[in-house]
Image (cartoon, coloured by chain):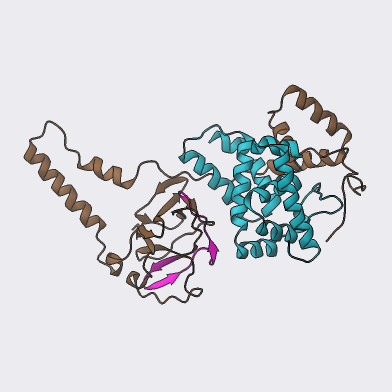
Amino acid sequence: MEAYRRYGPALLRKCRRLLHNGHDPEDIVQGLFLDLWQRGITDPDLPYLYRAATNRCLNLLRDRQTRARLLSEHDPSLQGPLRSSLEQQVLDIDLLYRTLARLDPSSAEVLIYRHLDDMGIEQIGELLGTSRKTVARRLKQAEDTLRSLCDGGSP
Amino acid sequence: MTIQNPRTTTNPTHGACIGGPLSWLTLDQYLLGELSDEETRDVSLHLEHCPLCRACLSEARRVDEAPLPALVFPERRSTCLRWFSALKAPRTRPLWAALASAAAALLVAMLALHDPGPEADGPGRRASFKGGEAVLTLIRERSGQIRQDPEAFAPGDRFKVLITCPPPWEPRYEVIVLQGGEATYPLEQGRRLVCQNREPLPGAFTLDGQDPALVCVLLGDTLPAPRTLRLPDANALPPGTLCTRLHRVP
């Protein structure tokens, strides 16, 4: 499948940014392209695939045991150059997983695009087909949840 | 938790990012040559002055050099379609000959599906659950050849399980192989599945031994305690278990 050869590496890197190493990123990317093939979609574009891969990763992370397993497998030395930031702080992966577990799917998706994929609000809005205002609102909700967990309290 | 802002704090290896970092989507589109001319110029200019983003681009190029895992495609034609094709009689034959041939083919198919072992009365690949039906699909890879819902296994074959179940159900699952009166658990236990069409379960497995094998999947909001099921045969499996039968290639 040409689309898999072309976009597979980028999507694998994207899934590894969130799920890190192991077979989960490969399973997610392969499952995504198999699904596209079965639906007869042969020419997806990268923004569409980014969204699809993100949502599949989030589905996987909804399970607490999966989160615990991924954390136990996490090796920070394999992370590569780090650019993600939340104002003055770099996201801790455990904190990120706990935050994602508490967010609705829309806000979780925006948090990943902003702080793992380093997208600006305008680019996120283009990707989601929604306004900057909506993106900003979802991002604020996500970041408020993140900060409340940093402070050790519940949102 | 580390406190570090790569935008204003000097990264010991690559310095600080100049302005806002390029998003990974933009970097990936740049690598693939999918940006407009203007966007490409902007990215190139940023990379020229930003060692951190240049390092990310180099890292992406290095990682992308690794071989991509093979994509396993199931065969399009189902066993059912092949069976119906075998029943078709040529037009030139007399009707009684065609009917006799069809009856013989039907009998052969029924015998082929009949397993004299204890699994003969066991569960099948479909089962009803709340909200709809669940279906087990088994994919076999043998020396690069892919087959959906195979009927046999041989040493070296690899198997992948796909589950179709009604969304938004997210059941736990357990894959069990019954063979020679024993139960084995080839995939990671205690995980949860997000129901959709043909969702692949993580991991793959092989089958050994000389006896026919029954590959089963338990689905449920809760499952029995880990690996404590006493399974002398398929009839001991909980209701709603999905199973498919494989015989050993001689």
Check the image and report above or below for A124 versus B191.
above
Q: Position of residue B47 (x, y in %)?
A: 83, 33
- Please state, as top left, top right, bottom left or bottom right, where the C terminus of chain B lies in the image: bottom left
- Residue B70 visible in this rendered orientation of the protein: no
- Residue A153 visible in this rendered orientation of the protein: yes
Q: Residue at x 79, y 55 (%)?
A: A91
Q: Residue at x 67, y 51 (%)?
A: A108
Check the image and report above or below for A27 versus B183.
above
Q: Position of residue B245 (x, y in %)?
A: 34, 60
Asked where in the image residue B83 lies, by quadrant, the reply is top left
In the image: residue A123, left or right of residue A27: right
Supply the letter of whichever chain is cyan: A
Which of the two residues, A15 or A94, is positioned nearer the viewer here?
Answer: A94
Which of the two residues, B197 or A153, is positioned nearer the viewer here?
Answer: A153
Q: What stretch is highlighted in magenta?
A: B176-198
Which of the two residues, A4 or B199, is positioned nearer the viewer here?
Answer: B199
Q: Main SS type for the magenta part?
A: loop
Q: Which residue lies furthest to the top in this view?
A: B37
Residue B186: say if magenta. Answer: yes
- Please state, as top left, top right, bottom left or bottom right, where the N terminus of chain B lies in the image: bottom right
Asked where in the image residue A43 lies, by quadrant, the reply is top right
What is the number of callouts on the image? 0
What is the display colour for chain B? brown
Q: Where is residue A137 in the image (x, y as percent from the top left)?
A: 73, 46
Residue B135: say if magenta. Answer: no
Q: Where is residue A57 in the image (x, y as percent from the top left)?
A: 62, 51
In the image: residue B247, left or right of residue B157: left
In the image: residue B61, left or right of residue B183: right
Which of the two residues, B199 or B230, is positioned nearer the viewer here?
Answer: B199
